[in-house]
Image (cartoon, rainbow, N blue to C red):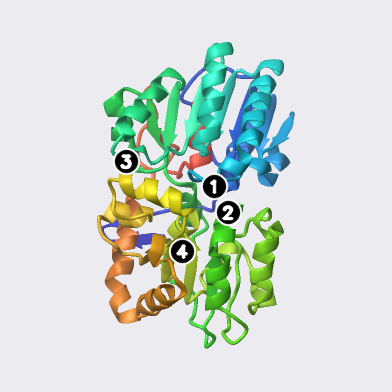
Amino acid sequence: MLIFPGKIYHVTTYQAEAIICRLLNMQLRKVLVACGEVSGDQVAAAITRTLKTLGIREVHGVGGPLLKKEVSGTFLDAAAINKYGLVEVLPSIFAAKALVKQTVNLAGSERVDAILTVDSKGFSFRVHEAIRNSLSSIRQYHIVSPSFWAFSNGRQRAARLKDILDKIFVIHRFEKSFYDSIGLPCDFVGSLAVQRLICEDALGVRSHVHSKDIGGLFPGSRDHEIESTLPLLRELFGRNRALYACSGFNESVDDVSVWREVKESVYEDEDRKRQSKYDALKQLQWAVCSSGTMSTELASLHVPQVVLFKPHWLTALAVKSLAKVKYVNMINILASKELIPEAKFGDCTPANVRRLLEDALNRTTQVDTIRQVGSIVASEMVPFDAHCDDVGHWSCQNNPLLLPELVAQSVV
């Protein structure tokens, strides 16, 4: 049982094959799941695993190593386009165009009934547009909304999705009203990171405090994220400080040479490397991470952290000129204030990160912040007591329906 301010949740152990309520009666035989970024690979793999439990005969895939393990049909590797940003994506633009074409050809040659894309808006929406123009009978879905709501021209850009998508699945509650207002069918399914934490029973009281100052480094899942933060991490940390270096528990990131260079410069606890992900996270006294899923998981576990955001200077210029929000971390955006310290743009320097990290480690001032984070995380969960009907609400005999199940059942 987990207790947040004003809320009590009874949860079970997470499993992607949890009890599933089907919302639609259409019988699909072939589905294509496509993910252009490592950061969405876990979600794509979990949804694919669930689709197979629903009796889908063939699931084809475009994505990373986790998705590759789950697909039962043809697989295309998307490692070459694992980029994000304005300038950062330029070196891989030709590879991205080629993969879009290959993905559309795969959908056509295998005669899939539906395609579900995960995150990676540049790749995903180009695939959907091409499929709508040439293979209009295929049902088209997308999960993880771009942050259109954060930019001045966001509504106009989001409205274009009505022409290429049958439905979008969003992971933040406020995003549903955003898409409802522009007329695009939308379901709120919650965050896989939060739901998985809940059902691993990982939230709540943290593990006992260790005498060592054990921290975690989570530079992100994209190559350019790691490369941009490498000099900062190298300057900040060395062998003179006990440190548990974590790559975000993503096997593809472990293969990045620049990240291995950082890992070799810090102390790693071999015992903790063998622990499960959330057991390891609960041992941390502090963390430095890129903004994203890992930040939400760390906040849910009450681990003090500093969030890094250091894009190319041209990307930073574009973000600053168009953004309507002050923060890059989702919890801060939802709270409309900086609960989690951010080191972004020109302020992402070793000296500033060190200062913010020391502030974050002040346990006295962190108590209220942690409580607020708990409330925000709880608000992002899919209600367990909703009812299953023909308009897309969920229920499962008091068992929590998790993101992979919610998405898979709606696609089917």
Q: Secondary structure at mark 1?
A: loop
What is the three-letter code of the residue carrying label 2?
His
Q: Secondary structure at mark 2?
A: helix
Query: Which residue is label 3 attached to?
Result: 151
Residue 284 visible here: yes
Residue 130, picture quadrant: top right
Residue plotted at (38% across, 66% down):
347
First-in-chain label (4 vs 2) = 2
Distance between the Cα atoms at labels 1 and 3? Answer: 19 Å
Residue plotted at (69% across, 66% down):
260
Distance between the Cα atoms at labels 4 and 3? Answer: 26 Å
Can you tell which mark lies on residue 19? none
Query: Which residue is label 1 attached to?
Result: 88
- The total number of labels drawn is 4
Q: Secondary structure at mark 3?
A: loop
Q: Secondary structure at mark 4?
A: helix
Q: Is residue 111 left or right of residue 281?
A: right
Percent coordinates x, y for residue 377 in the rendering: 36, 55
Mark 1 or 3: in front is 1
What is the three-letter code of the residue carrying label 1?
Glu
* Proximity of marks 3 and 2: CB atoms separated by less than 8 Å: no
Query: Which residue is label 4 attached to?
Result: 298
What is the three-letter code of the residue carrying label 4?
Leu
